Image (cartoon, rainbow, N blue to C red):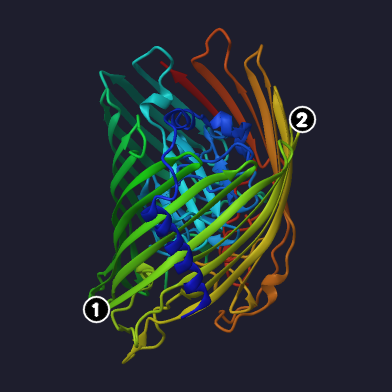
Amino acid sequence: MSSDYLRALAVSTAMSTLLCTGALAQSDPTREAEAATTSAEDTQAPDGVTQLETIIIVDVGAGADATAGADVIIIDQQEIDRKKPRDLREVFSGEPQIAVGGAIPSTQKIYVNGIDENNLAVTVDGSRQNNKVFHHNGTYLLDPALLKAASVQAGVAPADAGPGALAGSLGFETKDAADLLEPGRNFGGFVTGIWDTNSETYTTGVSAFGQQGGFEYLGYINYSNGGNFTAGDGDEMPGTGTNLISGLAKIAYESVEGHRFELSHEQVRDDDLRPYRANVYINRPGREPELRNYDLHRQNTVFTYTDTSPEGWWDPKIVLAYSRTQIATPEYFFDVVSPTEGATSSFNGKVENRFALDIGSVTAGFDFYNDKADLEYRNPTEPFFTDERATNIGAYAQARLEPFDRTRISFGGRADHQWFTGVDDSDWKNAGVSGNISGEYDLVPEFLTVKAGTSHVWGGVPLAENFIQNPLWTYADGPEPVTSNNYTAGLVALYNGFTFEANVFRTDISDARLPVFGRGAPVPEVTSIRTLDLVSNGWEIGGRYDWDAGFVSVKYADINADVDDIPADSEIGRYLTTPLGQIIMIGAGYTFDDWGIEVGGDIEIALKTDRTLVRHPTDPESAKKELPGYEVVNAYLEWTPPSKPNFTLRADALNIFDENYTDRAAYGQDFDGVDPHYDPGRSFRLSATARF
């Protein structure tokens, strides 16, 4: 039995002992009420800078409360309102620990501390996401227009973040009617119009919402259409047009006793011509066309029950959800066209209760998922259908305590049992335990805080990508469950509006699954078993100054990842990592309250790296390239006339100096013979919003 297993088991046993023996006393109701009414403004500085000296329990939208001592990054409502993001990259701008690769929304992937989001517990409104469809697409297509918050617990994640939190958790939370209604009103809405000059893309969004007699409702629809954009050198990027429609509907009822029932349904669809491999250009004339149509459709349905007036030890939460992502695109082989459709889905849920205590809280419950990944390949002569399935049931407990003055700790564990079914209908059972512990201590109250955390995570057997599935796969003695160990440490200093942060981290993932379709035909036996070991480590340092009317922020991160002890590139790193290196983010904003004007901007600087020149044994034969550096500058001006506070005009100047570049986390730029998407050149985005 491994030391990692014993460590996780010890944490789980300790947690269970505390619960069973009642060693922690029931809380004071007055303290509970104070904790329940703590707002985001009370627990963090403007624009997402966490105030660690006051945070104990904060709902960060990741399916779990924040964890004291862990590396928590929160993009809150104030930050989203300032950025007005149009894609995931803009959501996380200013955070060098979080890289988003991909020039268009349908190919964007998120990397946290250099780790692909497929190794995180990802949720949307509490619903587990299972989006590993095609490695040339993004894994999550999100319209940020109605995003309320985005949060990341990098590396160490709590047990109640969900199963599979190998390198942390990532959560998105959409707005409710109450978030949009103006004080004293029970009905409202807004209309938005956006024009992008580079691609000549227009976007129109309409929303209506209200509440009456305990009922709430919200409806939103957004449509974008436009052409290809041009890169910084003036070249048009084929297959980068926009044809996207998204929608969100929510209904809720809250009784006078505080019982809240909410049902939400979200859909996003992107349907347009893309490069044959959506995120790169590879020219194979006569065999494949330059472009083909990609129809990407994602949906997410969530039912949630909570008690908004908890008393004593009774603070339940129930989530039942279904999410699905589907891609349909034709496969070409000379004159043979094979319509192909891949889909991943997850039926998931949890039942938990938060036990309030005098010194904090304990959250305990169980969760489940039933995930499926299937591929339908309709070749005229050799069609086939394949699928892999995984079902998991887990039980967990997580304590968040302040046992001593100036000290906050969090620890917990979970046990999971998984049933995995392969493409050949073979069945495999696996079980494992996970544990975490982290804490923070105020060395100097209201000035200097130190923090650290560690976790061991059992992740089960991940499903293979749909478009790589092979009906001839065999599983030998069975796929190996993936595990990870995470370590983080850091400090935060606060003084007269200044915030200084420094963090170091390391994530070790063992037996990460990266299957390949198989080479050669006919193939009597092709194994699906291919596992790799990944290590990502680095550090981040940052400073920020906030005053009444504005802020200035500078952050630097140095992130490096190795696969099987060899520097990672974007090919071997599929679904695992991508080469990042050194990234600097600078941001600033200022508000002229008397005039209703807000101005600001940001700069992203990526330094050149040659770690990609090292060849992995499984790399393609093409020559490798270093990653060039780049500097991208953006700015914005927003005006809300004081005489017409329900009307807002905004102008964004993007890539002001027309830099010709590919963002650092994009796929394929480190190989000769592969032309990655260049990001858009200079563009002006004009928008108007009217609220009623």
The reply to whether residue 144 is in sight is yes
Q: Quadrant of residue 601?
A: top right
Quarter occupied by the C terminus: top left
- Tell me the residue at 65%/43% (across/down): 94
The secondary element bearing badge 1 is classed as loop
Q: Nearer the viewer, residue 182 or 443?
A: 443
Image: 631 above or below 671: above
Image point 53% across, 32% down: which residue? 40
Residue 562 point in image, percent of width and height? 62, 73
Q: For this rendering, which residue is in front, 240 or 545? A: 545
> Which is more toward the observer, 675 or 164?
164
Decide: is 103 above or below 251.
below
Residue holding disc 2? 496
Residue 332 placement (x, y as % from top left): 36, 70
Residue highlighted by disc 1: 382
Residue type of the residue flagged with mark 1: Glu
Say few, some or many: other residues with alpha carbon within 10 Å of mark 2 (under 14 / 14 to 19 / 20 or more).
few
Up-down: is 689 above or below 379? above
Mark 2–mark 1 Cα distance, whole angstroms, equals 69 Å
Residue 426: image quadrant is: bottom left
Q: Say whether marks 2 and 1 touch (CB < 8 Å).
A: no
Give above or below for 180 relative to 531.
above
From this viewpoint, which residue is outermost toward the bottom? 524
Question: Which label's residue is closer to the chain start, 2 or 1?
Answer: 1
* Dot 2: element: loop
Marks 2, 1: nearer the viewer:
2
The numbered disc on residue 228 is none
| Outermost residue toward the top in this view | 643
> In which quadrant of the rendered view does residue 268 lie?
top left
Q: Amino acid at mark 2?
A: Asn
* Residue drawn where x is 38% and y is 73% of the image: 468
